């Protein structure tokens, strides 16, 4: 068993370099991180799963180990995931977190995967409110005020408490969030265009695990209940005491839930 993470590279359909970390042995699972993350935030649960799964933790385009293309779209994100799935091999499972879960859903609609794990996809980021927030964030970014744009996201959309926002601003994490914000902006535009309707996933028959934190289960951004009702073969597992970032705050818990599902 390889418990030491190893870096690899594959090329997407448009030639963009997509980097990923491989760790573990057993059934393959490709892990797709969220909008303000990189692969690093999913390495702790991946290493905790290493005795039960082979994890392929990818850096999405424009982040970390990966390059970037000239033309961005949701389709390019799907192509990137498919490229890593091809390396992982036939029957590989797919796990997506936050916006990565939306792209994982879209990938599973188009290409065969083994099982699917979705951790709080923000499909609720749609409609006039989201468009208004995105417009205000865009104007701040264009004015060179990315810190202020990030504050709009955290306080108006994600409802992060003031004390948590201040803690983030005082930590090294803030610089990473600011650096990733331009890529977050472009994917948010694609999510808004996609819309919040989950009916398009009703024909997705593969076994699906929906992960949701007990602290965020009622948040309007994360349509876990809607997906549970729409997906024919889905079940939900609540992460007790966790919110949207259980992968970093409770990696062993997340790893256990995912591994149990993939082995069931």
Image: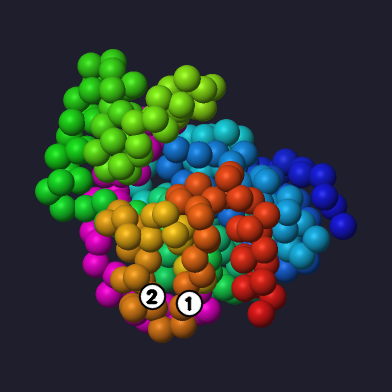
Residue at coordinates 43% horizontally, 64% vertically from top-left? Answer: 105
Q: Position of residue 113 (x, y in %)?
A: 56, 71
Q: Secondary structure at mark 2?
A: helix
Quarter of the figure that contains the N terminus: bottom right
Residue at coordinates 62% horizontally, 73% vertically from top-left? Answer: 261
Residue at coordinates 42% horizontally, 70% vertically from top-left? Answer: 109
The answer, for residue 49, to whether it is visible in the render is yes
**Pointer 2 or 1: first along the chain:** 2
Q: Position of residue 80 (x, y in %)?
A: 51, 51
Side (left or right) of 193 relative to 5? left
| Neighbourhood count class around disc 1 (C-alpha, 10 Å): few under 14, some 14–19, many 20 upward | some
Q: Nearer the viewer, residue 213 or 150?
A: 213
Quarter of the figure that contains the C terminus: bottom right
Q: Position of residue 222 (x, y in %)?
A: 34, 58
Farthest-out residue, left = 128
Residues rendered magenta in the picture: 180-208
Distance CA(mark 2)–CA(mark 1): 7 Å
Farthest-out residue, top = 144
Q: Position of residue 29 (x, y in %)?
A: 64, 62
Q: Nearer the viewer, residue 85 or 96?
A: 96
| Neighbourhood count class around disc 2 (C-alpha, 10 Å): few under 14, some 14–19, many 20 upward | some
- Which SS does the magenta portion mostly show? helix
The reply to whether discs 2 and 1 touch (Cβ–Cβ < 8 Å) is yes
Q: Secondary structure at mark 1?
A: strand
75 drawn magenta: no
Q: Which residue is mark 1?
A: 235
Say if 245 sits above or below 124 in the image: above
Q: Which residue is mark 2?
A: 228
Say if 30 sits above or below 174 in the image: below
Side (left or right) of 242 relative to 264? left
């Amino acid at each position: 068993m390889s418990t030491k993470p190893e870096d690899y590279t594959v090329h997407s359909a448009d030639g963009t370099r997509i980097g990923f970390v491989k760790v573990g042995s057993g059934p393959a699972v490709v892990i797709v991180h969220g909008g303000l993350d990189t692969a690093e935030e999913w390495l702790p649960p991946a290493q905790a799963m290493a005795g039960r799964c082979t994890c392929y933790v990818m850096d999405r385009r424009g982040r970390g180990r990966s390059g970037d293309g000239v033309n961005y779209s949701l389709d390019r994100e799907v192509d990137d995931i498919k490229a890593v799935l091809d390396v992982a091999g036939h029957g590989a499972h797919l796990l997506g977190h936050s916006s990565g879960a939306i792209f994982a859903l879209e990938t599973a609609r188009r290409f065969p995967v083994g099982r699917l794990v979705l951790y709080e996809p923000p499909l609720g980021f749609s409609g006039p409110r989201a468009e208004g927030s995105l417009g205000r964030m865009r104007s701040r970014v264009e004015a060179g005020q990315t810190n202020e744009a990030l504050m709009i996201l955290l306080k108006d959309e994600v409802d992060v408490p003031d004390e948590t926002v201040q803690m983030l601003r005082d930590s090294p994490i803030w610089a990473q969030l600011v650096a990733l914000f331009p890529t977050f902006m472009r994917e948010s535009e694609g999510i808004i265009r996609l819309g919040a309707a989950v009916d398009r996933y009703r024909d997705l028959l593969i076994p699906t695990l929906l992960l949701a934190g007990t602290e965020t289960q009622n948040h309007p951004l994360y349509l876990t209940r809607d997906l549970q009702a729409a997906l024919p073969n889905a079940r939900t597992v609540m992460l007790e005491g966790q919110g949207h970032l259980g992968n970093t705050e409770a990696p062993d818990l997340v790893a256990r839930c995912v591994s149990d599902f993939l082995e069931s």
